[in-house]
Amino acid sequence: MPQKQYLTPELVQWIIEQAKDPIWQMGVLASIKKHWFGILSISNGGLIHIHGNQDTGWAHIMSRHGYYSNDLYFGDGALGDPSRFQSSGIPIFDWRQIADDVYAQSIIDTKEHPDAALFIKYTGKSERFTRSGNEPKDFVLILYRDSKIVHSIFPKKSLQADTPKSKLRDFKRALDHVTGEKPLNGEFLTIRIPYVNKEIIKRYVIVVQIELNTMHALAHLQVNWPNGQPRYSIHTLLGFDVDLQKSDVDANDIKLTRFINSFTKYCDFGHMEEVMARTEKHLFADA
């Protein structure tokens, strides 16, 4: 497993010194990134937010907990679906305010971060986010030890629970690898939704065929060998209707793109994921 790129003790001290510059007290937002460890902003509560990377800081929060992120996470503590902020939020305002609220409550989580030598973990409530309805929610704030540098901030439970929870532990729905195609004179739209392992090998593919005159869809499952090559298919595991216009498919415009993006992310394929899990257990147990 690749080593995570966290802040070193030297970088932590460098950032603390940079944060003393009075300009940060003026609410400045450093939109231009010179270094991944550079300061993005300092909140009213004095918390330091850095630009970050895939493993820490603002970029990490966006990748792992942003509503629209399709990034895949594998490894210790990473399997499963991370909690998400909501689609209507304004991250640069919401997330900083939430972090300030949690920090102000000073409640240290008894369940330590896996890298407890580097981080201290707080829990608390906040209602200072877009469309909260003044209803406080539970959040987790993780800081670098002996500093106010934010490693991560996220809700304990997703704020907008409309993404179906996966039934799989070892495979992820690879949304950035989804394809959709329609033959020039064909009457079917075919959408292929791959499920990958931590090596990003396509182990299973849900193949959805939509009959464009009736908008009825049939979902089939392609089972691949461990090397990603097709082994066999299980036909018609699921049937349903979709809300789509044939004219949008024929025009191949933004409406079709939105449909594919929304459908492949939010459609509940729990039944087919159970078939994948059983297939993996009985067919590939010794692979």
Image (cartoon, rainbow, N blue to C red):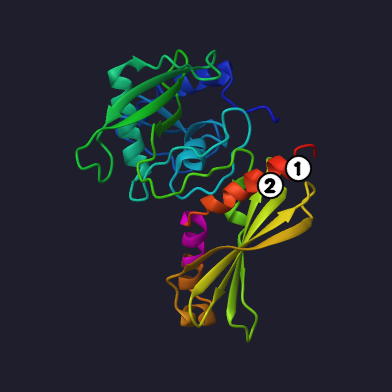
Look at 36% across and 22% down and name the residue there.
123
Looking at the rendered image, the quarter that the N terminus falls into is top right
Left or right: 52, with 43 as reference point: right
Q: Is residue 45 among the parts visible in the rendering?
A: no
Badge 1 amino acid: Phe
Label 1: how many Cα within 10 Å (few below 14, some 14–19, many 20+): few
Image spot of residue 166 (x, y percent) = 52, 44
Look at 57% across and 17% down and name the residue there.
10
Q: Is residue 267 among the parts visible in the rendering?
A: yes
Look at 33% across and 16% down and name the residue there.
107
Q: Which residue is the site of mark 2?
A: 279
Q: In front: 239, or 96? A: 239
Residue reaching furthest left?
Answer: 134
Label 2: how many Cα within 10 Å (few below 14, some 14–19, many 20+): few
- Residue 59 against residue 111 in the figure, above or below: below
Image spot of residue 256 (x, y percent) = 49, 72
Q: In front: 125, or 197? A: 197
Range of magenta residues: 259-266
Residue 185 falls in image quadrant = bottom right
Q: Are marks 1 and 2 in contact (CB under 8 Å)?
A: yes
Q: In front: 199, or 48? A: 199
Look at 52% across and 34% down and name the residue there.
52
Badge 2 amino acid: Thr
Residue 169 falls in image quadrant = top right
Looking at the rendered image, the quarter that the C terminus falls into is top right
Element assignment for label 2: helix
Image spot of residue 26 (x, y percent) = 30, 33
Element assignment for label 1: loop
Image spot of residue 276 (x, y percent) = 64, 48
Q: Which residue is the site of mark 1?
A: 284
- Residue 60 against residue 67 in the figure, above or below: above
